[in-house]
Amino acid sequence: MIKKYVFFIMFIAVLMTGCQGIPLTEESLIKESETIESLVPIKTERNNIETVNSNKENYESYTGVWTEGGVSSAEILANGGTEFGVTIKNGNELEGSIFSQQWATQRLAEIEHIKCDIANGTCTYCFSDDGWGGTGTLFITFSENKIIVTVKDYKLDDKNPIGFGISGNYVFERKNPEKETKTEIKEPDFSDRYYSMSSDEMNSEINKRAKYRADCPFFHEVTNYFENVRGVRDVANVIEPLYYTDIKYYSEDDFKDDPLLIIHLAKNEIYAMHGYIFKDEDLNNYFRVQLWYEPYVTPENFDVNVFNEYEKANLKILSKLDTYKQ
């Protein structure tokens, strides 16, 4: 009876091996068991990979518009400031742009098409032009409720004497929609120095333009006006405009005590702010002394549509008052 039972077991084993005809011996069972066990680590390894992918850093919550102080875009356009537009894809792939506007002159600087992969809360991007020829590297750090951008190895373009560009450090906060309706334009302050030049650099640039100052027949009169009427006895008369006609509405009373020359210059200053190249030699010499002046548009190519509503209104008043004759 026992022999019949053993024979029956061996017969079933042969059937289980199928058409290969390999007997299922004790040795083969051990090898089969080892083969199955060898697959276990592979499965475990794949599971680990899937776990790592699921824990990949994700910064997509930072997508949006970030500004210094969380102010609105309207306030930046009115009072100056810097804005960082951010889009995060696939968890850590940043695309964005940084836009900066200078307050008094409304000069613009911008770094577009920023792209970098974020790792451990940071990423870097090398830029070759900030709109003024400046180059450097952006070090971008993501912290709680803030994005900090530090510009390192910044190099100023030789053709940018005023020093304006995207440089230094920026702390961005998410733009607060509640501030959109609370924008107030700050009053001009003639003691404000909005250039990043050192005093030595500024004096050097002023000396470079000494030729234009010497060739301007009325520059001495303007200097006297600044000293005796406005009480300004420093370099403010060449680094700041006469009036902030691009961010404030003026009335005729604001100019009632001004000499006709100053009114004449204030009117033309509106054009100079937009790079207008003057054919009049005296006006050309006067504005080339100003460190904020960058001549780049000929009269033939100048478009008056560049004027904003403040400038249009102030230009209308100043044109009416301007009766200066050389």
Image (cartoon, rainbow, N blue to C red):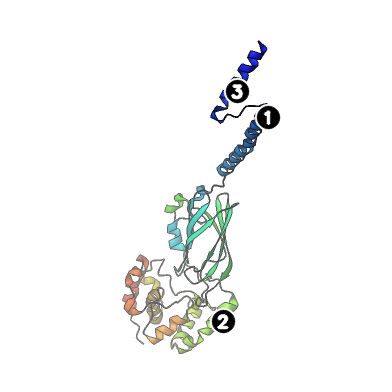
Q: Crowding at label 3, few (<14), some or many (≥20) Cα neighbours within 10 Å?
A: some
The kind of residue tagged 3 is Ala
Mark 1 vs 3: CB contact within 8 A: no
Please give the label number shown on residue 325.
none
Residue 13, label in figure: 3
Three-letter amino acid code at the position of disc 2: Ser
Of residues 186 and 293, the one drawn nearer to the viewer in this rendering: 293
Q: Earlier in the sequence, mark 2 or mark 1?
A: 1
Name the foreground residue: 319 vs 153.
Answer: 153
Q: CA distance from mark 2 to mark 1?
A: 93 Å
Say which quarter of the image contains residue 18.
Answer: top right
Q: Nearer the viewer, mark 2 or mark 1?
A: 1
Label 1 sits on what residue type? Answer: Glu
Residue 64 locus on image (x, y percent) = 47, 52
Q: What residue is disc 2 on?
A: 204
User: Residue drawn at (44%, 57%), measured in percent from left and top?
Assistant: 73
Residue 171 place in picture, x, y as percent: 56, 57
Give the mark nearest the N terminus, 3 or 2. Answer: 3
Residue wearing tag 1: 27
Tell me which label, 1 or 3, sits earlier in the chain.
Answer: 3
